[in-house]
């Protein structure tokens, strides 16, 4: 959950800290006091778009800081993600988040004490937080969002089916586009393929080997300087181990080392350290003998072969002809040939390949059609359960005669759309299937089922949104839910029911509610009030926790605009008492 939220320099908020509880947190205050800035601050903290226009001129930057404390599998996953990114959790396991926005529009993010991309905050926000407000209600009116809502409700097995469909759909479209491109650009592809074939034929005839140019360069140097190398190796060999050309009275290194070893060994009985030195000289003699043997073998292999030298000159000339055309060195030529072979296979527009690709297209199209049919059936099954669950919640939100219907529709393709055959019917298909999903509302018995944007008033849409979120909460989702005035346009009994539903959500989730309804605020586990201060030259707002008498005065203000009215306070205390009984039930 989000334990603490500190906001500095954002809108009318100068510097304030919200200490939150794990249950239902309600934020109230007069219009214009800055309640919305709290939600704006949450959005910034979890990677939302930075608006420099909301930054206060003094101090010229807005800072939002939060402390997350998560448990269970989600907590482990978040801490692992933060650690992998270079951040650290505090000793108590909590994670510190921070977002800074300057008046010039620059933005910085910190997670676990380390500077990180804002996208990291967004990634964490998707796992931790779900925000619902007036804009979210508008988003729910989009067909794509309604389809996503149904898919989310359907569960993990349904998501795996969607993933399988999307993978097959992507492969199918790739083959369709490849086949069309090969047919459309057959002449151009053929010309490019001919050029590649000429290059490959030339390289194949020469058959360059990896590192061959460097090996030939070294061999040429040996052959061109064979006589000098022979003289040097011969003199070194004679100096180390003698030879037929050496004078009989000239000692070599092997003889001198032997003399030194024997001399020291003769005195080792007097001083044992000389024996150690004698052993080391023997090791040196062995090493000298090995070098002498290798020099002898080197001399045997050294051959000034004019024919071989000429052959190398010709080979190097052939390799240079390739490097002038295709790459800087022989290894580059080999890489060019490998890439050319790959490209050549891609350029193939032969009838045989086109026929093979067309068969693959048909196979994948059949797979996509089969998966699309399964996806439609799964959505229709989930639609029935989803409709029933949301309708039950609506009955508890003072809409007992209303019913939500989820229509899973298909449509015929237009000229430019991909199409698949699903159970003998040709349908338009996209990355999410061959379905369109539409939420419809039966406002009362006998009323036609109308799309939400046509059949629901503002208050009804708020309750439908809340009902959907209550249904989702039973299937998991983010642990923290934020509702920003989703009770707009609602009052009376419906307001009490919204408070009851939010309180029920708070049993399993952390809930933050920005509201203007006292019936909703009465159900809070923690009540925070945003208060405006106009005493100075600049208007500022702060947030404080209200309890007992102060809370009753705030509810009285919300009820009648009279915080000190005895009658208003009495009504507020009665409302708090009713809410307390409902929460215990």
Image: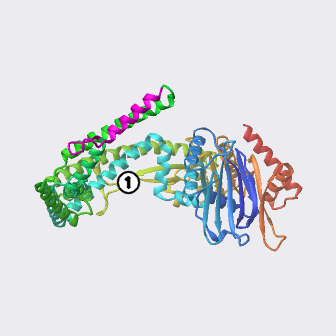
Q: Is residue 532 above or below residue 568?
A: below
Which scheme is used to colour this image of the protein?
A: rainbow
Q: Position of residue 402 (x, y in %)?
A: 57, 50
Q: On the image, numbered disc 1 is attached to which residue? A: 431
Locate residue 340: give its quadrant: bottom left
Q: Position of residue 389 (x, y in %)?
A: 54, 43
Tell me the magenta residue range. Answer: 241-268
Q: Position of residue 170 (x, y in %)?
A: 34, 52
Relative depth, front residue between 297 and 160: 297
> In terms of secondary structure, where does tag 1 sit?
loop
581 relative to 140 in the view: left or right: right
430 relative to 75 in the view: left or right: left
Locate residue 321: give its quadrant: bottom left
Residue at the image position 64 percent from the left and 41 percent from the top: 508
Identify the residue at the far left of this view.
Answer: 307
Relative depth, front residue between 557 and 273: 273
Can residue 489 be seen?
A: no
Q: Position of residue 437 (x, y in %)?
A: 44, 53
């Amino acid at each position: 959950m989000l334990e603490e939220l500190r906001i500095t320099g954002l809108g009318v908020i100068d510097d304030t800290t919200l200490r939150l509880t794990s249950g239902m947190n309600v934020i109230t205050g007069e219009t214009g006091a800055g309640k919305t800035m709290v939600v704006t601050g949450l959005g910034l903290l979890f990677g939302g778009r930075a608006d420099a226009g909301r930054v206060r001129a003094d101090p010229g930057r807005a800072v939002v800081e939060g402390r997350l404390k998560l448990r269970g599998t989600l907590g482990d996953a978040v801490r692992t993600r933060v650690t992998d990114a270079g951040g650290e959790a505090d000793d108590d396991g909590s994670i510190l988040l921070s977002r800074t926005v300057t008046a010039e529009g620059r933005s910085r993010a910190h997670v676990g004490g380390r500077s990180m991309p804002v996208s990291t905050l967004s990634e964490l926000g998707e796992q931790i937080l779900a925000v619902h407000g007036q804009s979210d209600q508008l988003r729910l009116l989009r067909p794509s969002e309604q389809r996503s809502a149904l898919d989310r409700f359907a569960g993990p097995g349904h998501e795996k089916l969607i993933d399988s469909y999307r993978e097959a759909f992507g492969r199918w479209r790739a083959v369709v586009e490849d086949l069309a491109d090969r047919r459309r650009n057959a002449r151009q592809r053929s010309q490019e393929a001919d050029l590649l074939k000429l290059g490959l034929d030339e390289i194949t005839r020469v058959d360059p080997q990896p590192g061959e140019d460097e090996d030939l360069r070294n061999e040429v140097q040996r052959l061109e300087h064979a006589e000098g190398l022979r003289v040097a190796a011969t003199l070194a060999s004679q100096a180390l181990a003698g030879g037929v050309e050496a004078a009989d009275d000239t000692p070599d290194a092997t003889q001198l080392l032997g003399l030194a070893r024997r001399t020291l060994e003769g005195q080792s009985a007097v001083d044992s350290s000389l024996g150690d030195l004698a052993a080391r000289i023997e090791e040196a003699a062995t090493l000298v003998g090995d070098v002498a043997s290798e020099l002898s073998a080197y001399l045997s292999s050294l051959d000034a072969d004019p024919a071989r030298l000429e052959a190398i000159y010709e080979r190097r000339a052939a390799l240079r002809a390739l490097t002038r055309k295709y790459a800087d060195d022989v290894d580059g030529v080999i890489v060019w040939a490998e890439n050319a072979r790959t490209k050549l296979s891609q350029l193939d527009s032969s009838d045989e390949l086109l026929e093979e690709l067309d068969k693959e297209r048909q196979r994948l199209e059949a797979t996509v059609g089969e998966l699309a049919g399964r996806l439609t059936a799964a959505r229709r099954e989930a639609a029935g359960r989803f409709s029933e669950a949301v309708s039950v919640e609506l009955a508890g939100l003072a809409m007992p005669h209303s019913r939500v219907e989820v229509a899973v529709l298909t449509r015929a393709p237009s000229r430019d759309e991909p199409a698949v055959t699903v159970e003998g019917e040709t349908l338009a298909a996209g990355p999410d299937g061959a379905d369109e999903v539409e939420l419809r509302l039966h406002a009362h018995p006998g009323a036609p089922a109308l799309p939400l944007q046509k059949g629901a008033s503002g208050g009804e849409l708020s309750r439908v949104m809340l009902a959907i979120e209550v249904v989702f909460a039973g299937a998991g989702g983010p642990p923290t839910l934020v509702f920003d005035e989703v009770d707009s346009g609602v009052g009376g009994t419906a307001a009490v029911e919204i408070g009851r539903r939010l309180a029920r959500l708070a049993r399993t989730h952390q809930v933050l509610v920005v509201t203007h309804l006292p019936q909703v605020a009465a159900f809070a586990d923690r009540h925070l009030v945003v208060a405006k201060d106009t005493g100075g030259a600049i208007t500022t707002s702060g947030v404080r926790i209200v309890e007992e008498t102060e809370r009753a005065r705030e509810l009285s203000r919300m009820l009648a605009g009279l915080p000190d009215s005895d009658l208003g306070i009495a009504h507020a205390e009665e409302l708090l008492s009713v809410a307390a009984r409902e929460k215990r039930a």
